[in-house]
């Protein structure tokens, strides 16, 4: 296992602040989503990422525009950091035609061709074989592209994970497996569903190099991701990265959270990625409280504008119902 | 030129591989083994292991990889040995390949061709003898083809590869050894049904492995003075209802022949469309000959009894025509 560097934040002030700001944007957007869900503006399943922001932010700032992203149903943060505008993400959740999937996908199916964001997948593990295909296409067409595939630890119980790891390793494909281990597959704790709870050991059984990082720490995530991306981009084959994280909210808006103690949630909240990182930056002189408040106000303003955009956006006409089932 | 159905499939793939460097063939035993049904024999030597890609026994994984590769700019032909194994890949076919275009708001199409063998008749018992074409024909977002002739086996692959959407091709295992003349113009579309035999008294509607049986039945009926028109659906989704309706308006009677089980069969859908569109043209209730509702048995006489056969088709047609 490779260890990411410890010590002070190894980045300049601008980059550090940028990552903090992106975490804030996800947090504020999703807090608003929860509120809008209560107001029945957003419907369907809504899986919030609150608590896990360091994973998407740390990871996605380590990859390039030509790289491919495959994500799961808890992907609002990934889409946002990848560069999908908050306006069209919000419009998608409202089900409006201006949404990034024209209102056909909703919260679980955010897609954006321009940023090579390929979902958005409501089937646990369903994105993993796709990532293999992207890796194969890039390898055969001799492109130095990385496919970053995000999934939860629950997906590692699926056959899709094992089939995909095997294919990636067998064919030495440029695929970076990013497991966001938040300890619960819906309500099923890792130890109650997996005989082997050491996820890196599982991945390593396919002869794939692995790395474990503190998913509550954006520094650890980003530095680990840089190592992983470099490995894959250099043509050294697939890589497995485990980001140890925790969601502060329920699995979805329907989840009464009977499966875990409140004390456990509170304990993890003390490691929350936003306040630990901002405190660290302040202590290192890379952030002032005033700057933080400005970022927060900017994030809130972006959220407000996105909600207004989504509210004002048009519904797709029902006459278009059968559009895009087949190519024209 | 005389050739087998297998050779026609083989020529079509060979031509596709030679014509477009984005095309590659992937599946279980397509390379060193030469293809379970010998459709890719010699390809490994000719095109190399990158483009003739043997996969592990990992249907979900490699079918999903085919979808990803299609999105990544390649034109994969993915061979799933038989329809039975494709059930292991259903998630990727139904939840991803078929749905992606719509649920992404039209941003992504999946130019994937998925080939598999289907059908019974070789005493392989239940798990290797099923005809599940109608399961696939149920799914919006994919195109489902069933080449039943040497010409279609030769002609359908190129338009399937040119189609930006996922295409599933069912090759009936009993057809691979079928031998016949490849007509000069074997090019075809992948949108329309075909009239395989003209007739005036009754329409026999079928597809895939049941076509030769249905044509044989039509010959027997002709000897008894009943002129049957034989329609080959060819495209199981989207169905070409116009060709059916045109035939029904001429014959006013129909029997549907389908190797799928009767309940929820493709035959049921065809009958429903005939009733919806041609009710007032009908002179008799529409009948169907399907497989008996049993997992296909091993013993030869039992297997034969379970499947549509020429005498059953002849009997159904005579009953419908009242002769």
Image (cartoon, coloured by chain):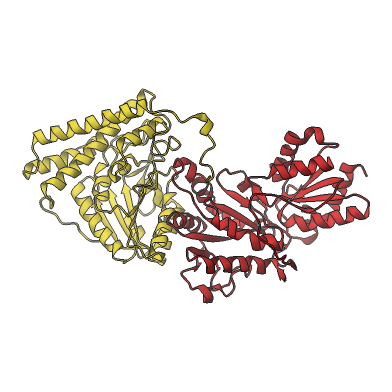
Q: Residue furthest top?
A: A39
Residue lying furthest front: B185
Image quarter for residue B284? Answer: top right
Residue B57 percent coordinates (x, y): 52, 62
**Residue B157 visible in image:** yes
Q: Quadrant of the N terminus of chain A?
A: bottom left
What color is chain A drawn in?
yellow
Estimate the x, y position of residue B183 in percent, counting from the top left. 72, 65
> Relative to A94, is B313 above or below?
below
Relative to residue A188, is residue A223 depicted above or below?
below
Of the pair A6 and B264, the residue shown nearer to us: B264
Q: Is residue A77 left or right of residue A18?
A: right
Colour red maps to chain: B
At x 11%, y 46%, the residue is A13
Task: Examine the rendered structure and indicate whether residue B46 appears above or below residue A21.
Answer: below
Rendering coords of residue B93 (x, y %): 53, 50
User: Is residue A271 among the parts visible in the rendering?
Assistant: no
Q: Nearer the viewer, residue A297 or B92?
A: A297
Expressed as whole percent of the image width and height from the top left, the position of residue A256 reads 37, 30
Q: Which of the two residues, A207 or A84, is positioned nearer the viewer here?
A: A84
């Amino acid at each position: 296992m490779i260890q990411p560097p410890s010590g002070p934040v190894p980045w300049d002030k601008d980059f550090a602040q940028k990552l903090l700001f992106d975490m804030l944007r996800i947090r504020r957007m999703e807090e608003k989503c929860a509120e809008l869900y209560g107001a029945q503006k957003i419907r369907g399943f809504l899986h919030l990422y609150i608590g896990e922001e360091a994973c998407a932010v740390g990871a996605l700032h380590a990859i390039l525009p030509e790289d491919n992203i495959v994500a799961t149903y808890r992907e609002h943060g990934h889409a946002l950091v990848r560069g999908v505008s908050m306006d069209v993400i919000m419009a998608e959740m409202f089900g409006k035609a201006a949404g990034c999937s024209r209102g056909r996908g909703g919260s679980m199916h955010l897609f954006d061709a321009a940023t090579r964001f390929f979902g958005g997948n409501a089937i646990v593990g369903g994105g993993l074989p796709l990532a293999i295909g992207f890796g194969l296409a890039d390898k055969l067409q001799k492109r130095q592209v990385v496919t970053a595939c995000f999934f939860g630890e629950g997906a590692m119980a699926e056959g899709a994970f094992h089939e995909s790891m095997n294919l990636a390793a067998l064919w030495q494909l440029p695929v970076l497996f990013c497991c966001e281990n938040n300890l619960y597959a819906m309500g099923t704790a890792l130890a109650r569903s997996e005989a082997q709870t050491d996820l890196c050991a599982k991945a390593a059984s396919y002869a794939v190099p692995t790395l474990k990082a503190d998913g509550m720490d954006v520094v650890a995530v980003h530095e680990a991701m840089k190592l992983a991306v470099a490995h894959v981009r250099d043509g050294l084959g697939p890589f497995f990265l485990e980001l140890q994280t925790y969601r502060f909210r329920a699995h979805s808006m329907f989840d009464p959270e009977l499966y875990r103690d409140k004390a456990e949630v509170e304990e993890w909240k003390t490691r929350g990625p936003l306040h630990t990182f901002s405190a660290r930056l302040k202590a290192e002189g890379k952030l002032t409280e005033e700057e933080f408040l400005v970022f927060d106000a900017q994030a809130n303003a972006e959220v407000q504008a996105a909600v207004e955009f989504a509210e004002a956006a048009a519904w797709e006409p029902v006459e278009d119902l059968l559009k895009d089932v087949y190519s024209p | 030129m005389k050739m087998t159905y297998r050779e026609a499939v083989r020529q079509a793939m060979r031509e596709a591989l030679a014509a477009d460097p984005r095309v590659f063939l992937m599946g279980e035993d397509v390379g060193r083994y030469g293809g379970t049904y010998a459709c890719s024999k010699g390809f490994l030597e000719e095109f190399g292991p990158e483009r003739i890609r043997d996969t592990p026994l990992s249907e979900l994984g490699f079918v999903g990889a085919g979808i990803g590769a299609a999105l990544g700019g390649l034109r994969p032909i993915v061979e799933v040995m038989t329809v039975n194994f494709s059930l292991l890949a259903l998630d990727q076919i139904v939840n991803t390949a078929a749905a992606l275009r719509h649920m992404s708001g039209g941003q992504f199409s999946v130019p994937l061709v998925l080939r598999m063998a289907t059908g019974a008749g070789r005493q392989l018992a239940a798990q290797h003898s099923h005809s599940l074409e109608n399961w696939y024909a149920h799914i919006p977002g994919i195109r489902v083809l069933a080449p039943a002739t040497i010409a279609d086996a030769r002609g359908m692959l190129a338009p399937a590869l040119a189609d930006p959407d996922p295409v599933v091709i069912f090759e009936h295992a009993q057809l691979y050894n079928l031998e016949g003349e490849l007509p000069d113009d074997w090019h075809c579309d992948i949108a329309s049904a075909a009239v395989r035999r003209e007739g005036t008294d009754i329409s026999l509607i079928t597809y895939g492995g049941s076509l030769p049986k249905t044509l044989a039945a039509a010959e027997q009926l002709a000897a008894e003075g009943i002129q049957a028109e034989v329609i080959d659906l060819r495209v199981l989704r989207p169905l070409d209802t116009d060709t059916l309706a045109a035939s029904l308006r001429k014959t006013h009677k129909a029997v549907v022949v389908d190797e799928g089980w009767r309940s929820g069969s493709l035959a049921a859908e065809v009958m429903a469309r005939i009733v919806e569109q041609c009710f007032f043209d009908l002179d008799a209730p529409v009948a169907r000959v399907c497989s008996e509702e049993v997992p296909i048995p091993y013993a030869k006489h039992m297997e034969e009894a379970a499947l549509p056969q020429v005498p059953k088709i002849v009997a159904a047609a005579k009953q419908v025509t009242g002769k």
